[in-house]
Amino acid sequence: MTEHVFDVLSSRGFVAQATDEAALRQRLGEGPLTFYNGFDCTAPSLHVGHLVPIMAMIHLQRAGHRPIVVVGGGTTMVGDPSGRTELRQMLDAATIGAYSEAIVDQLDGYLDFAGGRALALDNSAWLLSLNYVAFLRDIGRHFSVNRMLAAEAYRQRLERGLSFIEFNYQILQAYDYLHLYRTHGCTLQNGGDDQWGNIVAGVDLVRRVEGALVHALTFPLLTTTSGAKMGKTAAGAVWLSGDMLSPYDYYQYWINCEDADVTRLLKLFTLLPLDEIERLGRLAGAEVRDAKRVLAFEATRITHGEAKAADAEATARAAFGWGAGDLDALPTTVVPLAQLEAGLPLAAVLADTGLTQSRGAARRLVQQGGVYVNDRRATDAEARLTGADVTGGGILLRAGKKKYHRLVVAP
């Protein structure tokens, strides 16, 4: 017997809140429904923070439900204040449009859009043509300012200042739900738990305007066991685009997770059966590394494909001495031979390649014995890399135990 999809989501840790859990569970078991997730176009790529809703969409689609991806070409022009301490950077329409197309292309790698099994829509198609006064009369009258100000997203911003344009965001997101209910029969909206107020506002709007029961489901905002926000590193966001973060670095992000988080991350970010995940979760001591390799490979395979996941694993094996492998997939910088012959300051190279945050940090790390050049510990932060350091066509740099970068010499 096929497991109920709500039980799948719940047992894997996806469920944070639902407007009526029993009613939603019943509806999901009655046959296919249409649901949606929104993604604003604030960058040319999504990041690991978006993976929880993406993976939930995969599970729901596999259970026979139809996802709608809504890219926020319209709402991005307003800016979501949720989780923000200041106004988001305002992007121009051309940039938002380019980001919208890139995000849809990216999500095509996770969901099956063939034959209408999933839809990708841009809310600029219905938001930008709204008549402002008519919209306020027809939609705005259903919103209580007092209730909106009580929402956490707005309350946190009041002390620092909340712009009028941001104040409209909740109304526009709620209208998205109403529009999708009317045009596509959409009866479920999903999102991160920080979106609860916005999503519930949409549920309420559909009820008030159409007299219909629709549902909301939110996912937990993940932190590591130590309390750090997932998806952030010292170098910045963990992007899903291979052009913005190499598949090797993406693989390394997962393999470097905290031991205590492995089982939870396997449940959320892989499609492995739960009994296999429980087996991996029982590994202890040095064997935890094996569970992390499975997590890293599976997560990288879902985002970048089987071949690139295999390349990243092989590169990690070579770099970390697990066995034979290829270093070509390591983060790489091409250095002109003339520059190398003149000598490259080690501290500057470490900072420029992202191995350290600054030249000062590079100098401190060298003093602490944490920098290696071709597996030889560097002792002088003011040293210069030259042609004498080239082995096998390049120079392998390491900062700490886990961060590698390769310099390749060009003629």
Image (cartoon, grey):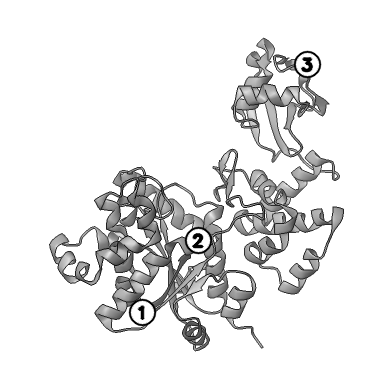
Displayed quadrant of residue 331: top right
- Give the residue type at disc 1: Gly
Q: Is residue 171 visible?
A: yes
- Give the residue type at disc 2: Asp
Q: Position of residue 20 (x, y in %)?
A: 46, 81
Q: Secondary structure at mark 2?
A: loop
Residue 128 versus residue 205 in the image, above or below: above
Q: Is residue 325 left or right of residue 248?
A: right
The residue indicated by pointer 2 is 108
Q: Secondary structure at mark 1?
A: loop
Residue 33 versus residue 372 in the image, above or below: below
Q: Is residue 318 left or right of residue 54?
A: right
Displayed quadrant of residue 86: top left
Q: Position of residue 2 (x, y in %)?
A: 64, 85
Q: Is residue 335 visible?
A: no
The residue indicated by pointer 3 is 388
Residue drawn 72% across the image and 72% down it: 274
Q: CA distance from mark 1 to mark 3?
A: 67 Å
